[in-house]
Image (spheres, rainbow, N blue to C red):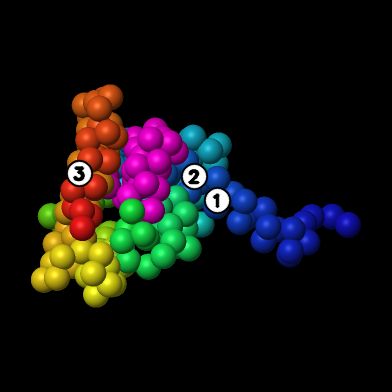
Amino acid sequence: MDGMSPRRSATAAAGTRTAIVQRALEVGSVEGLEGLTIGRLADDVGMSKSGLIRHFGSKEGLQIAALEAAIEIFRREIWEPAADAEPGIGRLRAICDAWIAYQEGNLLPGGCFMTAAASEFDGRGGPVATATRDAWARWSQLLERDARTAIEAGQLPAGTDPGQIAFEMNGIGLALNQALQLHRDGSATRRARLAFERVLAP
């Protein structure tokens, strides 16, 4: 039979899209989401510009696809390893361990894509900035939830602000990525571990 069947064609298209998004993650982690250009990625994956744009509709669509893939990596590498831990302080500590391991793992050449996106879009508007803010807001809410559980169980001091716990944990995660990627600081993970321990001290 000549040509591709619809099922095979859809599978090939999905594989092509996955390859493009993976390359977008690699480039974006170093050069930022604004550094993603249709021409650059088309050359990198061996496609025409028109062929690539058909998968995403626009540069903004490509940026959001890369961001969604980065969110999935963040969830897989940090949340999933901790998800089965006991709610409260146990899960928060498991999140800290997974967060450090993820940043040490260097899955992308520029480090944590979500951290880079937060810095890149913190003063901007538009759909990509909104998606970035929403992702970090959901993550903070998750941390707050377990902090609140820890407070109610007496694992953290009564009167502790769950939002403060989330704020400080996020600050440490962002600082760790900067120390590793910008300063190449060999003591960064040790310092991050100490900082997390202080935030979660009973």
State the residue in front, 20 or 84.
Answer: 84
Q: Quick check: 161 left or right of 29?
A: left
The amino acid type of the residue labelled 3 equals Ala
Instruction: Give above or below for 32 relative to 169.
Output: above
CB of mark 2 within 8 Å of CB of mark 1? yes
Task: Give the residue at x 74% y 58%.
Answer: 8
Residue 60, percent from left and from top: 34, 57
* Secondary structure at numbered mark 2: helix
From the viewer's perspective, is 193 left or right of 46?
A: left
The answer to if 103 sits in the magenta stretch is: yes
Q: Mark 1 or mark 3: name the one nearer the start of the chain.
A: 1
Q: Quadrant of the C terminus?
A: bottom left
The chief SS type of the magenta part is helix
The percent coordinates of residue 22 (x first, y second) are: 49, 44
- Disc nearer the start of the sequence (2/3): 2
Q: How many marks?
A: 3
Query: Where does residue 150 sit, x and y in percent of width and height?
Result: 27, 68
Residue name at image x 27 percent, y 41 percent: 193
The answer, for residue 87, to whether it is visible in the render is yes
Residue 155 picture location, percent across and down: 25, 64
Kindly report which numbered mark, 1 or 3, lies closer to the viewer in this rendering. 3
Q: Is residue 159 left or right of residue 114?
A: left
Q: Which mark is residue 195?
A: 3
Q: What residue did someone put label 2 on?
A: 22
Range drawn in magenta = 94-116
For disc 1, the marked residue is 18
Residue 35 visible here: no
> Would residue 168 be counted in the magenta stretch?
no
For label 2, the crowd category at 10 Å Cα-Cα, with few meaning under 14, some 14 to 19 and many 20 or more, is some
